[in-house]
Amino acid sequence: MALIKVRELRLDIPKEAKNLAEKMLSDLEKSKRPYLEAVKTSLDNSNYNSKVGYLTPGEKMVRTELNVSSVQKLARVVFMLEILLRNLDIGAVNTKRELYYICKGLIKGDGKYKPLDFEDQDESDGIIDFIGDMLEVYREELNCYANDRGGQTYSQQLVVTETLPDGDKANVDLSTLGTTPFQPKNRPQSLKLKAKKKIDFCLVVESEGTAGTLQSMGFTKRNNCILMGAQGVPSNGVRGWCKLIENQLDVPMYFFGDLDAYTMQNIFRTLKAGSAASLIRNGDFSAPNVRFLGVLPGDVKKYDLPHYKVKESDPAEARQLKKAKDALENDPFFRDKKNKELSDILRWLIKEKIRCEQQSYFSVDPRDPIKTEKIILEKIRRGDYV
Amino acid sequence: MSKITKSSTAEYFAKNLQQVGFSSPLKAVLTTLKEAVDNSLDACEGAEILPELEIEVKKVGIGSTKNTDLIKIVVEDNGPGIDADDLAKVFGEYLASSKFGRGQCSRGQQGIGISAATTWAQMTNAKGVQVISKTKSMKKAVSAQVDVDIKTNTGIVRNKTTLDWKKTNGTRVEFLMDGRIQMNGDGGLLTYIDGTVLVNPHLTVTHKMGDNEKTTVERVSNDSPEIPEATLPHPHTFKLGEFITHSHLYGKISLSKFLKTGFSRISDQSIKDFVKNGLPKNLVEKTITTMNEEDFKKAFQAVQATELMAPSTKSVLTVGEDSLSKSINRLGEVDFFSVMTRKPTICDFKPVVVEVALARFINRGSEGEPVQLLRFANRVPLQFDKSGCAITWAIESVNWKSYGLSQPKDSLPQGPYVFAVSIVSPFIKFKNASKETIDASDELVEEIRRALMQAGQKLSRHIKHEMKEADLERKLAHIEQFGPILVEKLVSISGANASRKKKAEEGLRKILGRDSDDAVNQLEEAQTKLAAQKQKEAKKMSSADEADKGSQ
Ligand SMILES: Nc1ncnc2c1ncn2[C@@H]1O[C@H](COP(=O)(O)OP(=O)(O)OP(=O)(O)O)[C@@H](O)[C@H]1O
Ligand SMILES: [Mg+2]
């Protein structure tokens, strides 16, 4: 069964894997220590160039050479690799959690595999990620998909054509869905987009609840737009979906979320430039043109938005502030001059120690049910975003 | 202190018993036991008798005050005994002591301890102490009840009789008082016994604590500790007030005579140096009873401004590494241990010696809990208020992780260990009158730290060896378990044939064999080092044995 490709992959995964096994085996035959190498996926190995638009891997590699301490990890890697290769061969698709149970089943069925057993899913997830980084392929290209999360989308103009695994096509006209959102599967790359009418902008809202509220108040009726809920930290599905919209429709994209360090670093930066953990895949899983519409520090004053003091006694909040300081020093995205206005927001947050939620717009004029929409439109019109 | 008249002394202490260890029902019991045992051990040592103690602590009823029980505390020794005429003074009079200000490393120092216990018993149960005592020269033992007359600070002897006693010499004290019994933990009775046993290798003790079974712990040394000669205090350890008080002990003598006889390290030359450093000449021969505070101040300042020889360290006594090594086995089944006796040294112008014993036990304590800390001052266990003590500070300042122990930040390390730290000095500075915590001067903490680190290094050889052993086992198991799977899967992915599989398996064995050889070598190296240390330790034990035989 031919699955829809995530990207035009130059790499033949089964062949690559076979070569790798061949190389390790022949090292062993010569009593040489075989090793595996993978891209180091961490901030200190991340590069950022605003022209590229997303975080890319540096030169650093993690090398796992065979010795008494690493033999367990290597055995686990080849064990999992064999399962993934078989999945590719027969066209089976699994989530990480399913793979965890598949491993457990195989291990239970054969006593000699017992030492490999995973204590929890984190352990098997780590092995899967390592294989992806090692072959420099996406997890999706190994037929491993995460559960769908986020990306609830509303529009009166957008038509999505999905190519199904069997080659059939399905057309979804989002205008026919009413208040029901369209949610892209975790393989947005298999979708083709078309605008029935010119779309003016795409608005990505951090809270999918708030996106739903805007929709039920008629947001997409009044505006030629795409309205989307991110549901917190964007999943691969959401990131790929935004990339697709950016590539195929060429509409300005705005992000609307909380004004706090977490949203700025974990949600917005990941949407715009990807993350350090997914260095090898940021190219297809980020939307570099997205702009930060709000909540902006200036909005707090301008609209007299209710806001809170960050409780530094709260360990989670204190951690966020500390992370924000780290980011200013070590995150190439925030250090880049082109993103100065974004890092200025972080600096402002560190200094003022306040946070303001996206829902605070609803308090500006409670008698006007579409005040939030009005503010958003006004901000877009006036270019009041970063 | 001399301002307190004899008659008000008892009243003062009766009102302030909490200051000398009677601040709670729990402490009252422990303090009484401690004072009685200290006295017995001091008395035996003074008479060069190997102590044999019998101790009983028992709940016998309900106390007269809220939340207390009526507790019976009995301590019987084989010491020299007390003359019948002295009973009133010893048990019923405060500040009556044969040890006061002697500058010896005895447990008792002040002449307060046992009278305070008598007072507590009297206050809570209307009866002081019941004593039986016999000296060698007495035909029959004397038995009496001694009370404290609080108004006059004199002892009252009641129901005095004579009796035939099983012992040729010795003393038995029995108290009935309000209190409560706690067995374990920092303030526990058994913790007290453990500590006392540890630092008194020459002690045989039979104890019956509460409902526990009667237990005898035999001595492991036949040497009665030699009490070093008394030493006079060094003048640089004094504050002005203490300096003046000290002079009151010497009556009508000249300042120069007082300085030369009341302190160590002051010679005729020193007196001349004092004058050079600002001591008015006319004061030198002035009688101290006629000196006013201004005079004392001048004298004191000149003394402080003059360099003097450091005090001698001869006056301190140690338990010794050999005896500690043997004694520690009396606390339970020892897995491994290390002991360290530092050379006597001077801290804050006072002679001190620090001894440390660290032991890992098989049957006491557990991995996740803090180590059990036993603190000693002049061989008396300190059981309260450990957080302010110099010993605790020193332990927490050492990085025990580097010796292979786990240790949360700025805390005691963890594991089934006993950490015993003993400070001996004729002039220990306590934080309070109840002698529970040692004042933490920088010099003293540093000295304790050094002792701990040396003991820690020795200990770590044992620990590292154990870790290497476990590590090697794990690694060898790894190779056997994961090697074949790795080859099998590589063969299956690459589609290789059986002969290649065999060859790869051989290669794998070679590679991992080298690794395990390395691990074995490392283990052997650790083993050799440890064996050398064990030999040293064994030598200590056997030389101690021989010394014992020699003295038998
Ligand atoms: N069991 C005993 N056998 C012989 N003599 C004793 C015994 N108990 C006490 N004494 C004598 O009684 C004196 C007073 O004892 P007490 O406990 O009051 O004072 P201390 O031990 O000198 O000092 P501290 O107050 O520090 O305990 C001791 O100095 C000692 O001479
Ligand atoms: Mg005493």
Image (cartoon, grey):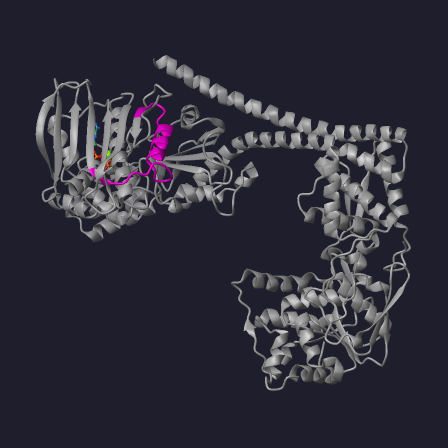
State the extent of the magenta-drawn residues as a range. Answer: B177-206
The picture places residue A155, in percent across and down from the top left corner, at 78, 76
The picture places residue A367, in percent across and down from the top left corner, at 59, 86
Q: Quadrant of residue B115?
A: top left
Q: Is residue A282 magenta?
A: no
For this view, does B110 lie left or right of residue B226? left
Vertical relation: A279 (above or below) B122: below
Tell which of B145 and B337 is nearer to you. Answer: B145
Q: Quadrant of residue B98?
A: top left
**Residue B279 showing in the rendered view:** no
Query: Quadrant location of the C terminus of chain A?
Result: bottom right
Tell which of A15 and B520 is nearer to you. Answer: A15
For this view, does B267 lie left or right of residue B517? left
For this view, does B97 lie left or right of residue A140? left
How many numbered badges does the structure rendering display?
0
Tell which of B268 and A2 is nearer to you. Answer: A2
Q: Is residue B189 magenta?
A: yes
For this view, does A23 lie left or right of residue B276? right
